[in-house]
Amino acid sequence: MSEALGRATKRQLFGAAMTRLQLVQGQIADMAVLIDNAALQVYRAAWTRDTIGGRTSREAAMAKLVATEGAQAVIDAAVQVMGGAGVVSGNTVERLYREIRALRIYEGASEVQKVIIAGQVIAAYEAQA
Ligand SMILES: Cc1cc2nc3c(=O)[nH]c(=O)nc-3n(C[C@H](O)[C@H](O)[C@H](O)COP(=O)(O)OP(=O)(O)OC[C@H]3O[C@@H](n4cnc5c(N)ncnc54)[C@H](O)[C@@H]3O)c2cc1C
């Protein structure tokens, strides 16, 4: 995100820095929210494990899902903000764009995390009912 921000701050479009364009600001806001969402989910899973203990399948699955899907979206937005430079071989965002894809597959694919989350939510509901 910082590489995209650096370029958007310097790059002039319509006589002003790209960061003055509201659609670019929307992308920056979306990226910031996704990054904070991921951090908060990871901290919650770790805090729950450390302080409450026991199984934390629901929290860990949510953290993995949100962090990896969010990272994919953030990197995709960073490539978009950087324009053609974002797909030039050797640029950081171009490398990250290729590298992030596998994280949504290994250590439990996103679909598998959703199955775990739904199972936990349904089990909690049925235990209360
Ligand atoms: C870069 C990389 C590094 C890896 N490193 C290791 C490693 O060090 N050690 C190791 O043991 N393995 C490693 N793996 C393997 C990784 O764990 C598997 O790729 C992963 O578990 C998915 O299994 P699969 O590839 O057989 O896909 P499959 O299990 O065949 O899944 C294919 C698709 O079906 C979906 N799917 C599966 N189950 C469901 C379901 N119930 N409902 C809906 N959709 C579903 C998946 O989400 C996926 O989209 C690595 C993989 C990659 C890409």
Image (cartoon, rainbow, N blue to C red):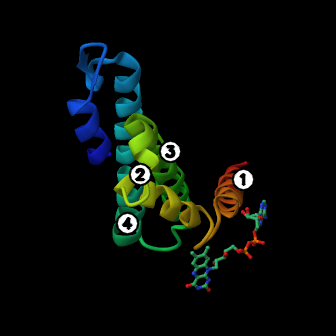
Q: Which residue is mark 2?
A: 38
Query: Please, what secondary structure does the residue beneath circle 3 have?
Result: helix
**Rendered location of residue 23, percent (x, y):** 41, 20
Real-space Cα separation, disc 1 to disc 2, in angstroms: 23 Å
Towards the viewer: 14 or 19: 14
**Figure quadrant of residue 91:** bottom left
Instruction: Give the CA separation, mark 3 to mark 4.
Output: 23 Å
Q: Is residue 34 visible?
A: no
- Whole-number angstrom distance, CA of label 4 to CA of label 1: 23 Å
Q: Is residue 109 above or below residue 126?
A: below
Q: Which residue shows up at 43% across the image and 58% down it?
A: 89
Tell me which numbered mark, 1 or 3, is placed earlier along the sequence: 3
For the point 32% across and 41% down, the residue is: 4
Q: Earlier in the sequence, mark 2 or mark 3?
A: 2
Dot 4 surroundings within 10 Å: few (below 14), some, or many (20 or more)?
some
**Tags 2 and 3 touching, CB below 8 Å:** no
Q: Amino acid at mark 4?
A: Ala
For ligand 1, give the image quadrant.
bottom right
N-terminal of the pair, mark 4 or mark 1, is 4
Q: Residues within 10 Å of mark 1 (few under 14, many from 20)?
A: few
> Quick one: label 2 or label 4, which is nearer the N terminus?
2
